[in-house]
Image (cartoon, grey):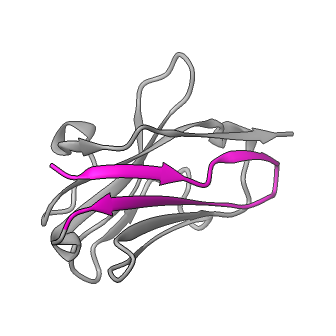
Amino acid sequence: QVQLVESGGGSVQAGGSLRLACAASTRIFSNYAMAWFRQAPGKEREFVASLGWSAGAEYYSDSVKGRFTISRDNIKNTWYLQMNSLKPEDTAVYYCAARLFRVATAPSDFDSWGQGTQVTVSS
């Protein structure tokens, strides 16, 4: 397992942007795949985006495709989620999760989780 710390959440008006960051404490950061999930009140945790350890393995949910971009910085041991054109329905607690090597999209596939960061989008 790896320790993950998220940052960058906040409140924004519809149409605005936020960038979330997920810092990982590991010496083998480049071997990890990660994903962002979100959970709104009263709803199940849902997949947002995932990024593999190798180039090209990048996936998005239909609800965020074209608006959100996932990326990684192997020097800073940090993953990012750039969120543009935010909508009120994007309001949720956002979690990052990590696992070795293989990219995945189900919460049960990940064994390391961050504490979550709140994103609130007002109309």
| The residue positioned farthest toward the top in the image shown | 42
Residue placed most toward the observer, 43 or 76: 76
Residue at image point 27% right, 50% down: 3
* Residue 114 at least partly seen: yes
- Report the side of 67 relative to 78 (left or right): right
Expressed as whole percent of the image width and height from the top left, the position of residue 43 reads 49, 22
In the image, residue 32 above or below residue 4 = below
Magenta segment main secondary structure: strand
Is residue 120 shown left or right of residue 41?
right
Side of 106 where 23 appears, left or right = right
Task: Say which quarter of the image contains residue 120.
Answer: top right
22 in the magenta segment:
yes
Inspect this view and state whether residue 62 appears.
Answer: no
Let me know if residue 33 is in the magenta part.
no
Residue extent of the magenta highlight: 1-26
Q: Position of residue 84 (x, y in %)?
A: 69, 63
Q: Position of residue 92 (x, y in %)?
A: 59, 35
Q: Residue at x 63, y 48 (%)?
A: 9
**Which quadrant: the C terminus?**
top right
* Image quadrant assignment for residue 89: top right
Residue 110 x/y as whole percent: 20, 45
Task: Please name the residue shown 55% across and 28% down the image.
Answer: 40
